[in-house]
Amino acid sequence: MTTVQTYQFGETADGRPVRGFQLSNDKMEVNVISLGASIQSIRVPDRNGRMTDVCLGFSDVAGYQAQTCFIGAVVGRYANRIGGASFSLNGKTYSLAKNDGVNHLHGGPTGFHTKVWDASVAGETVVFSCQSADMEEGYPGNMTVQVTYALTEAGGLSISYEAESDQDTVCNLTNHAYFNLSGGADDSILLHQMKINADRFTRVDGGAIPTGELPLVEHTPFDFRSFHTIGERIDDENSDLAAVGGYDHNFVIRGEGLREAACVRCEETGIQMRVISDMPGMQFYAGNSLDGSFIGKAGKPYEKRSGFCLETQFFPDTPNHPEFPSCVLKKGVRFASKTVYEFDLF
């Protein structure tokens, strides 16, 4: 059984109240907030029974509004990058905000991560919803989005995404949580062991935009088909790593439907996290751009590679790659997807 408690987390710089919710059961405790529909903390027991916070976050609203790394937030309308900040749909070209060089990233500077979402408790779940107006950040259609957080009996945090638009549009929703299974705010994640169920990854150029190639992971630093530490090959001389300064790539997840995409283990705590998703891709980002500028919940700066992201998604720049699995959301059709971050000991 899950219990849900509500509280006031604070307010934004322009006076918008931000609500907090704590979901807890006999396996874990999770705090989420209405700013960005963000995951603020995930506490699970380590091998000694100590409750350990395994995700990065901030203790107040000011911390979330100051950071620029999307920590913990739901991002959209289009998670990840769109090359040249434009795409064509139904014969019309749409121009988006250029907030990553000449490209568009995570829905733009006023994307879903900046919204204070409507929030409610529905039984044992927390439901966040928001509206995105036609041509907001350049995207067509009035879109309604709903994100539901729930705890599972198996020790998982389930995230269900739903969206609907009154015009054809593109849709790619994910959560940008950063994880560190050691629980240490300033600890490196390079000794974490990772397995990714993917035979191919998405090659990108120096702007992190897909070239369209899907190389095999075999005989490359991207081969996580069996467990390897994150740091084992991250600094190898490899053109794909060099393009973006380390791991920041989409992996083509094997299979369809709800299945395991990845598994990560921390020897220090004995904590294991499985990522279960029905999306075709998953972005593995090793926190290469964290630089100590942002002070986390424990009062310590988040340094380079102190957290990793596993963002379930459509592939980056899919609107400009018709050969990729389609991200088009048709008028009046409901988009739905689910991701579970499941924790236990190994």
Image (cartoon, rainbow, N blue to C red):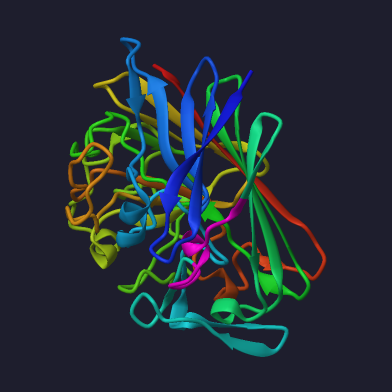
Give the side of residue 201 with respect to residue 237, left or right. right
Q: Position of residue 165 (x, y in %)?
A: 74, 68
Give the side of residue 140 with respect to residue 303, left or right. right
Q: Position of residue 98 (x, y in %)?
A: 41, 81
In the rendered view, tell whether residue 89 sits above or below residue 332: below
On the question of residue 242 being in view, the answer is: yes
Q: Residue at x 68, y 73 (%)?
A: 169
Magenta residue check for 246 = no
In the image, 233 versus 93, the foreground residue is 93
Magenta stretch, residue numbers: 107-118
Q: Residue at x 19, y 36 (%)?
A: 187
Q: Position of residue 154 (x, y in %)?
A: 57, 20
Q: Residue at x 71, y 73 (%)?
A: 142
Residue reaching furthest top?
48
Q: Quadrant of residue 51?
A: top left
On the question of residue 197 being in view, the answer is: no
Specify the quadrant that holds the N terminus: top right
